[in-house]
Amino acid sequence: METLQIAPNILRWAADQRGLSLDALVDLLGTPSKADAYKAGKLSIAQTEKLAQKTHIPFGYFFLETPPAKIERSLPDLRQLPDHSPLSIDFFDTLNDVQRKQQWYQDYLLDQGTQPLTFVGKFAFRSKYRPTEIAGDIRKTLNISEQDRQDSKDYKAFYNLLTEKIESIGVLIFRSGIVKSNTKRGLSVDEFRGFAISDPLAPVIFINGKDSEAAWIFTLAHELAHIWLGESGVSDIVPNQFNHTNLETYCNRIAAELLTPENQFIPAWEQAPNQFALLSKIFKVSQLVIARRALDLGKIDWSLYQMIANASKKVSKPEGGSPFNSYPIRNSKRLTKAIVTNAVSGQTMLREAASLLNVRPETVLELSKRMRLR
């Protein structure tokens, strides 16, 4: 078996792209007794192909003398955790996939003569509007009433209601815990919780489905704040103990006001202090959101918030039931409907529609049947 000489710095770069150490990278090849040789770049063609497959890095990259130029991020990295993981190829493949879908939808809307959405970038971040004013405008635009909140069974039902209302005004919401449709490529919560792409025609919110269900509703509201401010970015959605003036903290405050209005939250808290389960039922948000709001308003300290946050970190389970229920969630219900409708009418090739949705052509046809039944 012919042995190749791969530049060790290329192996270190490949490990970085996957968020691995060099030792963990060569562990993918098995045979621990040869680990030192592997780290020195002594690999066979088959072993190099295996690494390319495992890391999702093009095979030819392994034969470069120096790593390729750093991938240019098309979204600002707004993550606040000091020890967050580097954005990996899984993230960038997901971002590229979402942007490809967004581009299709932009063209689709332009063909229909759709006008720009007036709420995108309506409140400039630098203008320092009060979070209550922005949250109020979001609530009014979405037509969310207190009765809607009360009628929701729990925070999961309220989350579903919010997603429906947000998509109804033109925002595409994607929620997935995997890259495209590859169940072997799970997204990492250590990298990001969500991202927003501000666009006057087709704004996008992406929620990392690998995150806990308790976190989804706040991530949704946070990314929606980004759209209202006209600010794209990748987020980890964590409270910042030290910087209370940056964009992420501002979006957190808007999201908190949207989900738990201060003029309602404070009286409720005074009647039931530290009753997180009860307040969760009242506001139809998770206990994590209640704890976050209480922290922001000085009702609890950081250690108690951390305890509740850690308790809520249970990773969500894959969507149950028919996979046909998960396809529109991964690909935005609004976008899925547009793609499927265009494919069935012959305006978009069936193969292209399947590629956009990361499914088989026959799945597109089945989706069209199921959509007509609703």
Image (cartoon, helix red, strand yellow):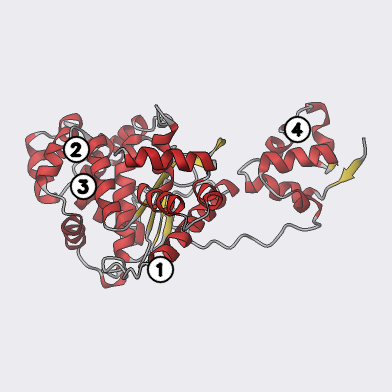
How packed mark 4 is, by other alpha carbons closer than 10 Å (few <14, some 14-19, many 20 or more), is some
- Where residue 78 appears, as percent x and y from the top left, is 43, 57
The answer to whether residue 104 is seen in the rendering is: yes
User: Which dot, 1 or 4, sits closer to the camera?
Assistant: 1
The answer for how far apart the CA atoms under marks 1 and 3 are is: 36 Å
Q: Amino acid at mark 4?
A: Leu
Could you tell me the amino acid type at mark 2? Lys
Which residue, given by chain and number where applicable, does mark 4 sit on? 29
Q: Please, what is the three-letter code of the amino acid marked with disc 1?
A: Asp
Circles 2, 4 touching at the beta carbon (< 8 Å) = no
- Give the spatial CA distance, label 1 vs label 4: 50 Å
Label 3 Cα neighbours within 10 Å, binned few <14 / some 14-19 / many ≥20 = many
Please rate how many residues cluster around mark 1, counting C-alpha atoms within 10 Å: few if below 14, some from 14 to 19, many from 20. Answer: few
Real-space Cα distance between discs 2 and 3?
Answer: 8 Å
Residue in front for this viewpoint, 134 or 46: 46
* Left or right, residue 212 beside residue 34: left
Residue 191 appears left or right of 10: left
